[in-house]
Amino acid sequence: MKFQRPRGTNDLTPEQSPLWRYLRHLFEQISTQFGYVGVDTPVFERTELFTRTVGEDTDVVAKEMYTFADRKGRSLSLRPEATAGVVRLVVENSLLASGGTHRLCYWGPMFRYDRPQAGRYRQFHQLGVEAFGTGGAALDAETIELFVTLLREVGLSDLKVTLGSVGDDACRPGYIEILRKFLAGKGDVLCKTCLTRTGSNPLRVFDCKVPGCREAIADAPKILDHLCDDCRTHMDHVGELLQTAGISVEIDPSLVRGLDYYTRTVYEVHYPSLGAQSALGGGGRYDGLVEQCGGPATPAVGFSAGIERLILAIQSEGTLSEKDWKSRGAYLCLMCAGAEAAGGRIAAHLREAMPVEVDYTGRGLKAQLKTANNRGARFAILLGEDEIANRTATLKDLDSGEQKVLSEEQLLTLIKTWIAGETRQSGL
Ligand SMILES: [Zn+2]
Ligand SMILES: [Zn+2]
């Protein structure tokens, strides 16, 4: 009997995982440099956490959530996004009691029951950051700068950052009434979902993908024309701070993002050469969410990015080469019976300097060297009867094909010297 993975999911194969690990490492490094600390939350939470924060009228909750009853009949959902869970974590662990700013980051799988298509999966992965504690524009700008730094670091530098605002309690209710009036006049062309949303949550009409609806709302009033002075100043200030940081920004009046909890700032970062699906990630401010989840009123801002999309962009653009993310090590070929002990000793020494994989298969040298090359190893180290008798090893440079016989001590020294030279060359 043969099994297949569920529709809309992926395996991370040995072929793919080195690039994923490289990206994760880089993200953690950059987040650390910006003062962000990693957190993890469960992949499932009480369903209510998502319906009440992400919003019942959003596509994410209404159409795409994996919801199930556990054995005691409690309703649980696989997390469709990370922010709600991180906010729950912050409140449940009383992180905000000490005041100040709290900067958190995460990496992990999310789940949405969507029709699978290129680059969209039912189990997908996101990285992201959430920063709690100040309502000023500088924190918004910082999260965008962190994101852009990561993208530039992997060679995606031709970016477009779009910035918008969804207003706050002072100006959004007024705008929503104006929008509702506008939508009421379009009753004959809107789809059923949009008609319902006109009553319950008119902003979500902008998420509709039905062509008739898109056409009907093309000239809908824009929230940017109805922002209060504070929201306008906030948005402009985010833009100015980014400009100062060397990141150019475009104001996008139609940017509303498909989740209910945003306040003021919303943003997206695009890599235009990807075409129609160019958004690498986005985020915004959610000043009311902590209080809504039972914590002290605390302004906050964050972003998330789709890791599959990011990997796809890196690969299709060829901005990195394998040698950026593959650590090239040594492949130890044992060529006679009784070579394991010497092999183990040499491997243990060399692992101080580089990754070492030992071939215990007892195959012929040709087959072992073929595997070494397939692995992308930098060196092969051959151990046969002569080498063992003389406590030596034959080092074969797999790039140049040169080989020489060395004592075990010389071997380690030579490899360490080689690594130091490589490091100097790459300017690290
Ligand atoms: Zn619609
Ligand atoms: Zn406002």
Image (cartoon, rainbow, N blue to C red):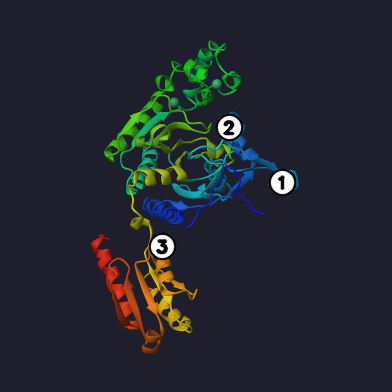
Q: Amino acid at mark 3?
A: Asn
Distance of label 3 from label 2 (alpha carbons): 49 Å
Numbered label attached to residue 70: 1
- Give the farthest residue toward the right: 72
Q: Quadrant of residue 310?
A: top left
Numbered label attached to residue 55: 2
Viewer-nearest of labels 3 and 1?
A: 3
Looking at the image, tell me whether mark 3 or mark 2 is earlier in sequence order: 2
* Of residues 171 and 318, the one drawn nearer to the viewer in this rendering: 318
Looking at the image, tell me whether mark 3 or mark 1 is earlier in sequence order: 1
Numbered label attached to residue 51: none
Cβ of mark 1 under 8 A from ligand 1: no
Q: Quadrant of residue 85?
A: top right
Viewer-nearest of labels 1 and 2?
A: 1
Residue 423 in sight from this viewpoint: yes
Number of other residues with Cα within 10 Å of mark 3, as a class: few under 14, some 14 to 19, many 20 or more: few
Q: Give percent across and percent down for residue 59.
A: 57, 31
Q: Residue at x 35, y 34 (%)?
A: 272
Q: Give percent across and percent down for residue 193.
A: 60, 22
Distance of label 1 from label 2 (alpha carbons): 22 Å
Viewer-nearest of labels 3 and 2?
A: 3
Numbered label attached to residue 374: 3
Looking at the image, tell me whether mark 1 or mark 2 is earlier in sequence order: 2
Number of other residues with Cα within 10 Å of mark 2, as a class: few under 14, some 14 to 19, many 20 or more: many
Q: Amino acid at mark 2?
A: Gly
Horizontal side of 397 relative to 5 (left or right) equals left
Q: Quadrant of residue 158?
A: top left
Q: Give percent across and percent down for residue 22.
A: 40, 55
Q: Quadrant of the C terminus?
A: bottom left
Q: Residue at x 30, y 35 (%)?
A: 248
Q: Amino acid at mark 1?
A: Asp
Q: Give percent across and percent down for residue 252.
A: 38, 27
